[in-house]
Image (spheres, rainbow, N blue to C red):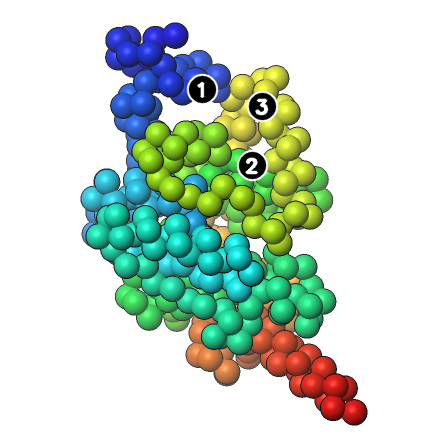
Amino acid sequence: MKCKRCRRAGAAVELPSHHAAFCPDCFFVFFRRQVTEGIRKLRLLAPEDRVLVCVSGGKDSLVLWDVLIDEGYETEGLYIDLGIDGYSDRSKEKVVAYASSRGKTPIVVELAKEGIPIPEAARCVRMQECSICGTVKRYFFNRVAAEGKFTVVATGHNLDDETARLLGNLLHWQRGHLARQHPLLPGEEGGLVRKVKPLWRVSEVETAAYGFLKGIDYVNEECPMSEDATSLVYKEALSRIEDRMPGTRIVFYQGFLDPSNPLRKGPEAAAADAARGAEDDAGEGVGAPQACAACGAPTYTETCSFCRLKERVRNARSLRAARGSR
């Protein structure tokens, strides 16, 4: 099969959703155009932005960092060590190695030093690991970005991730989450930094192909804490549909993002809601953003969700220690 773009070289990547196949060089052009068009269409980034790229060691985040560097954005990488035995060390090695190959040194946050490694925290408060991980990551994404004077935080969520989340929200009629779901979450006064998902137009298969052909060494294994994640069920369901009807994912998601869709708000209107949403779910009141009484981070309650979680972990440890001393 010949490359659709150059018509000379043999195709290395076949994309049924685009009715196309590309040689490696033409695929790189296609992939970067998909990303840059997604950025342009939703005005996710500006040339003058300082971008904090959240990297996990997996294909999506490292590919995102690679593309943004090649496109000329000023970027730094942030790796959060979740404290998962073996997996976190291997992931950090991939991040450090990639960063070194591009002349960079990643910012590293070690949750063990912060007193809240994910596996132990989950045991202490008896919550799902993914739920705790999300709360902790969001906190440090914003804190590191604000302290480092970054203008935007970028994550490697791809089309598969976003459509799986969308399907889950629709199946459970999570209207609040649907109203806030968007590749752009504008920042707010008080320290909430803008957040973007530049890979929203490219699939997981496309991202994996880009990483492989570009020679990016990434962690292939899934996070061991995510084995029971419902998002994997939604991804599998959408993959089966995509196999039968290529292009379904992008049509599904672009239709949802249409400004006329009554299920969602524009990114500007949803900005404050997104930050308040986590507090609403806890049954707390909302109001103007204020500084957390414990750490100073922006929050819509007296104490932010991260500090409340950390306090629960601290109390659980104290109780366990007291029982052990009897």
Helix, strand or loop at mark 2? helix
Label 1 secondary element: strand
Position of residue 189 relative to residue 96, above or below, is below
Lower sequence index among marks 2 and 1: 1
- Numbered label attached to residue 295: none
The numbered dot on residue 163 is 2
| Residue indicated by mark 1 | 15
Q: Are marks 3 and 1 in contact (CB under 8 Å)?
A: no
Q: Position of residue 15 (x, y in %)?
A: 45, 19
Q: Nearer the viewer, mark 2 or mark 3?
A: 3
Q: Give percent across and percent down for residue 285.
A: 62, 71
* Whole-percent x, y for residue 272 in the image: 48, 60
Residue 10 falls left or right of residue 235: left
For the residue marked with disc 3, what is the amino acid? Glu
Q: Residue at x 63, y 40 (%)?
A: 232
At x 42%, y 43%, the residue is 218
Q: CA distance from mark 3 to mark 1?
A: 11 Å
CA neighbours of label 2 inside 10 A, class few (<14), some (14 to 19), many (20+): many
